[in-house]
Image: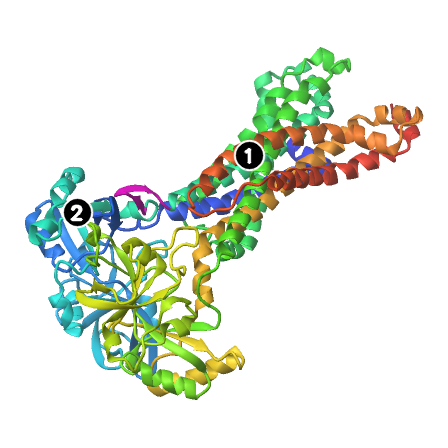
Amino acid sequence: MLTNYFKIAWRNITRHKLYSFINIGGLGIGMAVSFMLLLYVYNEFTFNKYHEKGDRIYQLFRNQAASGELITTNGMSVPIAAAIRKDFPELEKVARTNWAYDNLFGYKNKSLKLEMISADPDFLDIFTIKLLKGKRQDVFSNVQSVIISESAAKALFGTEDPIGKTLKFNTTGTVMVSGLYKDLPENGSFKFKVFGSWAGLEANQPWVKNYSWGNFSFKTYALVKPGIDVARLNAKLAGTIEKYNSADKENKLFLYPFERLHLYSEFKNGVSVGGAIQYVRLFMFLALGILLIACINFMNLSTARSENRAREVGVRKVVGARRFAIVKQFLGESLLMSAVSFVFAIVLVTILLDYFNSIIHKNLAIPYHLPQFWIAATGIILITGIIAGSYPALFLSSFKPVKVLKGLNKTGNATLRPRQVLVTLQFVFATCLILSTILIYKQIQYIKNKPAGYDRNGVIEVSQEGKLYDKFELFRRDAIEAGAIVDGSATSGTISTRNSSSWGITWPGQLPGEDKTPIDQIVTTYHFTNTFGVKMAEGRDFEEGRPSDTLAILMNEAAVKLMRLKSPLGTKVKWQGQDRVVIGIMKDFIQGSPSEPINPLIVGFMKDWNGTANLRLNSRISVSSALSKLEAVYKKYNPEYPFEYKFLDELYGEKFRTEQLLGTLANSFTVLAIVISCLGLFGLASFSAEQRRKEIGIRKVLGATTAHLWYSLSKEFVVLVLIAFVIGAGVSYYFMSDWLSRYTYHTDISPWVFAATILISLLVTLTTVSWQAIKAALSNPVKSLRSE
């Protein structure tokens, strides 16, 4: 019996090639898109889940009271780890780390910049770092020992055994390789290639030992003992900083689950409010929506062809087939179609996955080696086959054999309403995607076109490594003389993002509690405004001929407004523990998000707190020529370091990365949803024209024009699209209004957005349906009437 069902199913697939192509193509595309989206969802949900003790790993955070709200950060001071290790027996292990950053490592004639992190030894007991060579208890017996990843060892040593080898470290020091660990998974927070001890960090940077409770420049992780109530533990942890530093009553500590951090990293007023989980949910919605559209196509085409299968059902029932057996037959056909579609989908995924990875900035792969993949594949085939085939199977199996065999079974009216509902659902989803895509594009253009407040074109950033840190001014002078740049300035970090803030700042007329207000800061030396093209509202920049400028600051207009300074120039402001004089007021420029208000900012002079060289290239020569000249000067100062740079305009563009990702995905999936919907419409229009051949022939004989016949065949679909637009527009307006409300500065939802959406929907519908409608209208009526 099963063999017979399979043969009949295969015969139906091969006999009706057009409908099979539409069904397999639609289901295949829907499955492929859904599968890629679910790969992303799986990657996000398994992020940081490779740690064996992951359910007990927590990161230490603090809520800082400022300006009437709580600001949540993960920066920790050096003494905190020892304090909580001593005071809270609920913690099994505690480890400090610095922020990971690139360092130069050399072996023989080879030099590489590798990301390095330094941490307490307990780090290796908290997190799963699989040592391939070296013993856990011995790897840090030497202060200057490091362990390195497999890929780093291969890049530096080739086939040599790395254990015991000495590496040059940032040109002036050395470290010894005492262990080798397996490369860390890509779907995890840690990307470091070299791991050093905290003792090694203190040996290389002795000043770290002197950092007190007020310097929040590090991270702290903890492994909680099994069975501990973390909520109760957090209540006790909260006052730790105040206990050891009575002057700091604003910072309250709490533990946050490390595994949860990736998806729920956003905090508002001290409470977790979401994060990447919003985009994971969006991807899941898109995956299910597109797969549903493909399933609806299958249902529509299967029920539309019901009259062609009615006689087969009647004969089977006459010879004794029960309804359940017929349901099984049609579900079997659906499952076979689903299986063939899945094979086609895997081919599409294999072709498109690299492009998808380039969009989402991931490195996803089809996990053929995992049992979960085959379970998921089987599940997708079964679920899709059952969902797509259930309604057609139940509908077809309900035919009465007597009526069918007498030709009295009329399915037109019976199948009209369900098909209308299903087509409407398809275009509701497509309408939502079209309207959302337009609004996302509008918002991206709105924030991208907002003036930055400085000239970001033609500026590059170079890390102040090696001799560039102490000899920046000499390097700048030589680069100008070489014709490579026109100016340069050293800063504490990139100007393109907010990377540092300070509190405890005082000014005349300050109200109680305002000294706890965090104010953004940039530390620099000379030539700041000229290098970046920052406009001055009042005053001037720091000047080399004025020694007093070493105790001066610049402020932006937002800071002046915060401090309520009527005549800011010459005002004394206490910043970084020193009395500083305001010598210039800069016009506001964007550092954070262009869709949010500009924060108060202080730009302070300090020679020993810089790390980024900002260089404005000579615009009178080509960029490649300027970079070539600059590299020659750079190698004069840093011959062992690679010449690496970043363009400021590209760094600024990263502000829009999330919105651009949304825009690209929305655009791509809108097109795919429309294509899948069009496949279904094409099939339905084709079948509708076929079913109405006699009616069309009679109308033509009676004098109906081609335009009238085209209208008659197309109007049903146009009405459905209009209904779908009304529903989809309402749904989209609700959700997109909520999305836009998250931005302080955002575009509006103007009427032309809805007009464009309905025009696109109608154009797509009419283009799809018209080919079949016009073909039917132009057919010879004699042939259609004779065939009847």
| One can see residue 600 in this view | no
Q: Are marks 1 and 2 in contact (CB under 8 Å)?
A: no
| One can see residue 482 in this view | yes
Amino acid type of disc 2?
A: Lys
Find residue 81 and report its horizontal and vertical position in percent.
13, 55
Q: Nearer the viewer, residue 723 or 133?
A: 723
In the image, is 249 to the left or to the right of 403?
left
Residue 195 numbered mark, or none? none
Find residue 560 and report its horizontal and vertical position in percent.
31, 58
Label 2 crowd bin: few (<14), some (14–19), many (20+), radius 10 Å: many
The residue indicated by pointer 1 is 292
In the image, is 253 to the left or to the right of 322?
left
Whichever of callouts 1 and 2 sits on the residue coming sooner in the sequence is 2
What segment is highlighted magenta in the picture?
Answer: 265-275
Q: CA distance from mark 1 to mark 2?
A: 48 Å
270 magenta-colored? yes
In the image, is 765 to the left or to the right of 212?
right
Amino acid type of disc 1?
A: Leu
